[in-house]
Amino acid sequence: MAYRRVATLDELWDGEMMFLETEGQGVLLVNVDGGIHAYADSCPHLGTRLSQGSLQRHLLTCSTHGWEFDACSGRGINPKTACLKSFAVKVDNGDILIDVGPAGVKDD
């Protein structure tokens, strides 16, 4: 797979999150302090869509049972052993591009 344009910086402001689907994959985009991060839109606990949860600064919280993740790294805060599946992201001339293929999956 290759990088695909999925959104623009004008569509995803600092402190916001957005759900989108690309290549049959539900993706959660987050903008934290101008850094764009992409994760599978699925909590590792029960598969709840993380886009239904909340984003407060660097804290991403699942709506089902309150599992918490660092929105910049995808690492679990509560519980610490949980991690989100992340995707490679790059920004080019205001366009947000992600790679959801096997080569784009990041092992955190």
Image (spheres, rainbow, N blue to C red):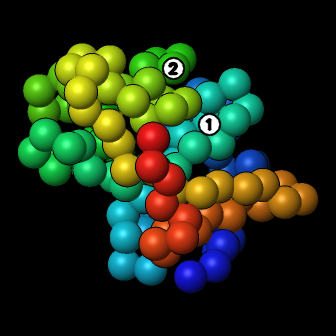
Q: Are marks 2 and 1 in contact (CB under 8 Å)?
A: no
Near mark 1 (Cα within 10 A), the count class, few <14, some 14-19 or many ≥20, is many
- Residue 55 visible in the current orientation: no
Nearer to us in this view, 39 or 31: 39
Question: Which numbered marker is on residue 31?
Answer: 1
Q: Residue at x 13, y 33 (%)?
A: 64
| Residue under label 2 | 58
Nearer to us in this view, 12 or 107: 107
Nearer to us in this view, 87 or 27: 87
Q: Residue at x 73, y 56 (%)?
A: 90
* Above or below: residue 49 compared with residue 54: below
Q: Residue at x 26, y 50 (%)?
A: 42
Query: What's the residue type where badge 1 is placed?
Result: Asn
Q: Earlier in the sequence, mark 2 or mark 1?
A: 1
* Above or below: residue 101 compared with residue 36: below
Quadrant placement of the N terminus: bottom right
* Above or below: residue 32 compared with residue 49: above
* Above or below: residue 64 compared with residue 50: above
Q: Where does the image place residue 89, in percent across and percent down from the top left?
A: 65, 55
Q: Residue at x 66, y 73 (%)?
A: 3
Left or right, 25 with respect to 90, comes to left
